[in-house]
């Protein structure tokens, strides 16, 4: 294993929810190191805690206990405003259902993180075009999401996630709503972008074959616990 | 997010649910319009009353009398006796008043009770002399006929009630003559006076006058429905009005003449029972009044009544404002409802924004700006609607007055400060209405919001 500092370090992270009188342990005492430029896939059945863990890394949720350090920042100690900045500048996120804003054009969707990061208005068009070029969708700038196929929508979502040049990309079931060939195309694109831009990718999926083909490492969760860590077969 | 991006996004969001947002904005507009229209009645009435009162001269006029003038035989004198005789209100005093700063004119109050003959029938009435300046006072607006051709013309303007006594068809009186019968005061030669008074005392005062009956033909040139000579200084309302110059030339005996002769103020000099001093504006009345009092005269103005009037209208405006605000309060609930609905509809969008890096403050401000934009647009529309409504009320009122053969009035007024205040209130109320939805949106858990279908 390389000795470089981890991009993301999870140390005994737990996330418990109270449901009435019972306590649900969505993530239970998980410790994990994710290296810079690593493509890590979180596997597990439904309810295993993989999406909760991804949300904790994204700073959308806070752990009940334990610490998460991403690029040297202890997420648990950040204020709500600092967490928002972290999500804006350090993290890029893509989702199973794409989560594009339906009434905005592709260009406006991709521009949204730039607005939130208060990037200079003059600089934005070039950044948007650059992001859409990476996903090969510059010819559809003025289209709305509903006018695109699922695969194209996910490519727009990737462009939006990358427009602020994040160091960590979090993908929650990115191929869940796509057919297998489109799903494979999306992951190929992610891999390509990773090697070109240099970033850490954490992908939640339940499609093991795809994970084995594209990820560097597979982490399996069950009932919130880390069950196994293994190198993927496709590891170069 | 910077303000321009916030505004961009807010406008975009408002355009997305265009029907609902337009209806909410219209709700604000209707609230603001009713507020503006109701307040405009208060402002209009206040301006109307102020203008009429200011034009009537009641609030820029000071009535000056000699210190003894109103004192009855058995009434105590509230002011300490200085031992000196009171200063007569004569021509010298009049000139002194004219020299005071901010005095526009000084004229005597000429009013006397006398008899008028018309069609050989006698009618008792009070004659009042009107200064030329009263032409522009507003009191003669809408009169039948015309104002006096000159200040010395032998012309009369009749108050409508008196005109009705003379004829069942008052307008037929215009151009006709009437005979004014009055008692002229003729000064006696001093030698005669001396002989006549020697019986009383060697040091008895000299002077005196005879009363000689006279007649004067006056041409009726106008009939007025208001009471231009209803001033507080008279002895009953003047119902037959004459030019002041012509009235002075009559040297008609007035109420105080007999008392003045007993008190030795009926010297050869012209003395007045009272003088009206007009100031440039009501604000200068107090200073002039004080100066005149220092000169040894009694002075009286209606400034205090004017203050009461202002208090009355302030309270009136407050009350109508409260009623006007009720519609605005209903509109506020409309904004709250629209924004709460928007949060439910845009729950997922709020989650996406937060996942992309929007802070709680960004989300809160976004909803806040949306509320403010609805308030601002509703405010502008509302001020416009309110103005149209106020004009419609004035039009309707004047139509009714026209049908009643009455003069039109400006019932309502929408001054710039009312428009600006309504706009500011609309925005502030809308922002207040946006407080709860905005903070609710900001507190949304992004994980829950992203799961929301």
Image (cartoon, coloured by chain):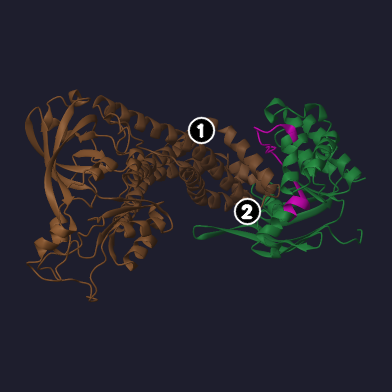
Chain colours: A green, B brown
| Labels 1, 2: front one | 1
In the image, is residue B406 above or below residue A20? above
Residue B179 appearing in the image: yes
Give percent across and percent down for residue A51.
68, 49
At x 32% / y 47%, what residue is drawn?
A: B57
**For numbered disc 2, what is the local secondary structure?**
helix
Alpha carbon separation for disc pair 1 and 2: 26 Å
Residue B256 can be seen, yes or no: no
Neighbourhood count class around disc 2 (C-alpha, 10 Å): few under 14, some 14–19, many 20 upward? some
Question: Residue B374's x, y, as percent?
Answer: 53, 40
Q: Chain of mark 1?
A: B
Q: Quadrant of residue A209?
A: top right
Front-most of B55 and B203? B203
State the residue at coordinates (91%, 43%): A196
Residue behind mark 2: B361
Residue B140, given in percent of the width and then of the height, sits at: 30, 36
The magenta span reads A86-107
Camera-side residue of A64 and B91: B91
Left or right: B334 in relation to B137: right
Neighbourhood count class around disc 1 (C-alpha, 10 Å): few under 14, some 14–19, many 20 upward: some
Indicate whether residue A95 is drawn in magenta: yes
Describe the element under mark 1 as helix, strand or loop: helix
Query: If you read the primary sequence from the N terminus, does the residue marked by circle 1 or circle 2 appear first?
Result: 1
Question: For this view, does B273 lie left or right of residue B421?
Answer: left
User: Within the image, what quadrant is residue A181 found in?
Assistant: top right
**Label 1, on which residue?**
B22
Q: Report if residue B244 lies within the magenta region.
A: no
The image position of residue B24, as x and y in percent, is 48, 37
């Amino acid at each position: 294993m390389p000795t470089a500092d981890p991009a993301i370090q999870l140390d005994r992270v737990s996330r418990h929810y109270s449901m009435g009188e019972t306590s649900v342990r969505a993530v239970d005492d998980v410790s994990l190191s994710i290296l810079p430029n690593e493509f890590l896939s979180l596997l597990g059945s439904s309810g295993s805690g993989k999406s909760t863990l991804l949300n904790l890394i994204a700073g959308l949720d806070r752990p009940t206990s334990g610490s998460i350090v991403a690029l040297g920042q202890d997420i648990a100690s950040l204020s709500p405003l600092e967490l928002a900045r972290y999500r804006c500048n350090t993290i890029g996120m893509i989702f199973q259902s794409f989560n594009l804003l339906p009434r905005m054009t592709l260009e406006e969707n991709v521009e949204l993180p730039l607005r939130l990061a208060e990037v200079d208005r003059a600089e934005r068009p070039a950044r948007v075009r650059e992001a859409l070029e990476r996903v090969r969708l510059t010819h559809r700038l003025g289209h709305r999401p509903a006018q695109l196929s699922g695969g194209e929508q996910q490519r727009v979502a990737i462009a939006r996630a990358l427009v602020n040049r994040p160091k960590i990309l979090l993908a929650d079931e990115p191929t869940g709503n796509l057919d297998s060939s489109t799903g494979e195309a999306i992951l190929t694109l992610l891999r390509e972008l990773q090697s070109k831009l240099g970033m850490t990718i954490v992908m939640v999926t339940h499609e093991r074959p795809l994970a084995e083909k594209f990820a560097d490492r597979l982490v399996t969760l069950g009932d919130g616990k880390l069950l196994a860590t293994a190198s993927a077969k496709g590891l170069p | 997010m910077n303000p321009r991006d916030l505004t961009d996004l807010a406008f975009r969001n408002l355009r997305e649910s265009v029907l609902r947002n337009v209806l909410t904005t219209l709700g604000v507009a209707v609230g603001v319009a009713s507020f503006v229209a109701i307040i405009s009645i208060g402002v209009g009435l206040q301006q109307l009353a102020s203008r009429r009162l200011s034009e009537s001269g009641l609030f820029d006029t000071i009535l000056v009398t000699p210190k003894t003038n109103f004192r009855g035989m058995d009434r105590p004198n509230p002011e300490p006796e200085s031992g000196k005789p009171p200063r007569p209100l004569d021509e010298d005093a009049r000139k002194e008043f004219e020299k005071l700063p901010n005095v526009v004119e000084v004229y005597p109050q000429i009013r006397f009770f006398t008899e008028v003959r018309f069609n050989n029938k006698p009618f008792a009435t009070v004659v009042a002399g009107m200064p030329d300046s009263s032409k522009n006072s507003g009191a003669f607006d809408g009169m039948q006929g015309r104002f006096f051709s000159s200040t010395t013309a032998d012309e009369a303007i009749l108050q409508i009630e008196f005109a009705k006594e003379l004829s069942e068809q008052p307008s037929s009186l215009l151009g006709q003559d009437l005979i004014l019968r009055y008692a002229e005061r003729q000064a006696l030669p001093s030698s005669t006076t001396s002989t006549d008074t020697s019986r009383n005392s060697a040091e008895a005062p000299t002077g005196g006058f005879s009363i000689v009956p006279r007649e004067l033909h006056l041409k009726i040139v106008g009939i007025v429905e208001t009471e231009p000579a209803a001033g507080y200084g008279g002895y009953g309302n003047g119902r037959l009005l004459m030019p002041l110059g012509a009235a002075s030339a009559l040297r008609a005996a007035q109420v105080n003449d007999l008392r003045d002769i007993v008190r030795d103020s009926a010297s050869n000099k012209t003395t007045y029972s009272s003088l009206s001093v007009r100031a440039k504006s009501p604000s200068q009345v107090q200073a002039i009044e004080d100066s005149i009092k220092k000169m040894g005269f009694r002075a009286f103005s209606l400034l205090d009544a004017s203050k009461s009037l202002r208090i009355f209208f302030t309270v009136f405006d407050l009350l109508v404002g409260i009623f006007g605000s009720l519609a605005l309060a209903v509109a506020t609930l409309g904004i709250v409802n629209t924004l709460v609905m928007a949060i439910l509809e845009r729950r997922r969008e709020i989650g996406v924004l937060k996942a992309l890096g929007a802070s709680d403050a960004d989300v809160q401000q976004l909803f806040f700006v949306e509320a403010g934009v609805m308030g601002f647009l509703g405010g502008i529309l509302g001020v416009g609607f309110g103005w149209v409504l106020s004009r419609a009320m004035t039009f309707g009122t004047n139509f009714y007055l026209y049908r009643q053969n009455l003069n039109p009035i400006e019932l309502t007024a929408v001054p710039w400060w009312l428009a600006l205040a309504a706009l500011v209130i609309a925005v502030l109320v809308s922002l207040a209405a946006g407080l709860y939805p905005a903070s609710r949106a900001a507190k949304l858990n992004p994980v829950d919001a992203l799961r929301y279908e």
